[in-house]
Amino acid sequence: MAYVVGEACIKCKYTDCVEVCPVDCFYEGENMLVIHPDECIDCGVCEPECPAEAIKPDTEAEAAEKWGELNREYSGIWPNITRKKDAPADADSWKEVGNKYPEHFSANPGEGN
């Protein structure tokens, strides 16, 4: 089992989770993060750190089906992120927005560190 980052992260991209990850398994896209499922050790310390509640165990149906594959794909493309960064200035206004993937997901990589 691993954890995955879901739709709630899009346009929020808080990085509180990155700071507590003991194995540095987060990868940064332009407007969201993903977790590499083969690097995640299922410790769960990242889940409560996410202000957007975007991190879920891959045992949850929605997380496993849609977001598990997206996390796997983009963690192989995007750069690794190991240190907390400032969230986007408008992140709080996106926390409660639903159905962000169709119009707001970006496949572009972030900066990493």
Image (tube, grey):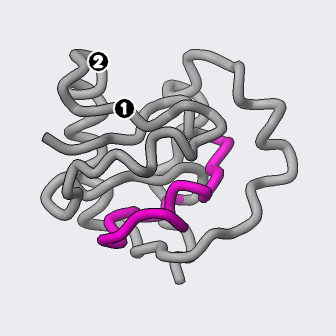
Would you place residue 60 above or below residue 95 in this image?
above
Residue 55 picture location, percent across and down: 43, 37
Give the spatial CA distance, label 1 vs label 2.
9 Å
Say which amino acid is labelled 2: Glu
**Disc 1 or 2, which lies upstream in sequence?**
1
User: Which residue matches tag 1?
Assistant: 56
**Which span is picked out in magenta?**
11-29
* Location of residue 75 by image quarter: bottom left
Q: Is residue 78 magenta?
A: no
Looking at the image, which residue is at 63% across and 69% down? 84
Report the mark closest to the observer, 1 or 2.
1
User: Which residue matches tag 2?
Assistant: 62
Residue 88 picture location, percent across and down: 78, 54
Say which amino acid is labelled 1: Lys
Q: What is the secondary structure assignment of the residue under circle 2?
A: helix
Determine crowd level at label 2: few under 14, some 14-19, many 20+ residues with C-alpha closer than 10 A: few
